[in-house]
Amino acid sequence: MTRGGRANRHRGEVEAVFDGERRILCLTLGALAELETAFAVDGLGDLGKRLASGGLKARDLIAIIGAGLRGGGNAIDDEDVAAMGMEGGVAAYAGLVGELLTVTFTGGDAPKKADPS
């Protein structure tokens, strides 16, 4: 379960609704370290290049969303993430990952998406 409140984009947080439940995602330093390990890269620069290269697989989306959910205070593992539903399907998952990465690496200055409710 996530902590209460709304996402603060200036802290790198975004909101998403999975299976009808609003959750906050945030790529904290711990979450980014988790992704460095998951993608077998050496540092944030290499992680950024890997993520910007395109061609992300479904497993990659699961890893990024899972790390973001855990960074946002959600007690959840990647198997649970893989089973969760999101309105809009694969395109929505990809859009969420894009938004999360943009907010993380721009300090929250990216344009806000429409309210997911």
Image (tube, grey):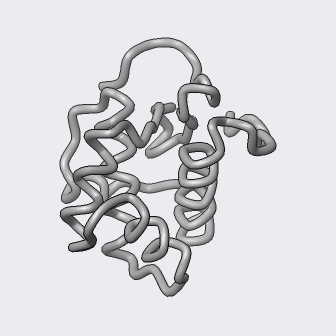
In the figure, is residue 112 to the left or right of 26? Answer: right
Where is residue 68 drawn, in percent x and y?
39, 44
Query: Looking at the figure, which quarter contains the N terminus?
Result: top left
Q: Relative to the observer, which residue lies in front, 89 or 96? A: 96
Location of residue 41 (image quadrant): bottom left
In the image, residue 14 sits, relative to residue 106, either above or below, namely above
- Quick one: which residue is furthest to the top in this view? 4
> Which residue corresponds to the image point at 30% horizontal and 54% vertical from the top-left?
81
Where is residue 14 drawn, in percent x and y?
57, 37
Q: Relative to the observer, which residue lies in front, 4 or 9? A: 9
Q: Relative to the observer, which residue lies in front, 69 or 51? A: 51
In the image, residue 3 sits, relative to residue 41, either above or below, namely above
In the figure, is residue 113 to the left or right of 106? Answer: right
Location of residue 10 (image quadrant): top right
Where is residue 37 drawn, in percent x and y?
19, 63
In the image, residue 73 sits, relative to residue 19, either above or below, namely above
In the image, residue 90 sits, relative to residue 6, either above or below, namely below
> Which residue corresponds to the image point at 36% horizontal and 72% vertical from the top-left?
60
> Which residue corresponds to the image point at 54% horizontal and 34% vertical from the top-left?
12
Q: How many marks?
A: 0
Q: Relative to the observer, which residue lies in front, 82 or 35? A: 35
> Which residue corresponds to the image point at 36% horizontal and 41% vertical from the top-left?
69
Query: Looking at the figure, which quarter contains the C terminus?
Result: top right
In the figure, is residue 73 to the left or right of 76? Answer: right
- Quick one: which residue is furthest to the bottom in this view? 55
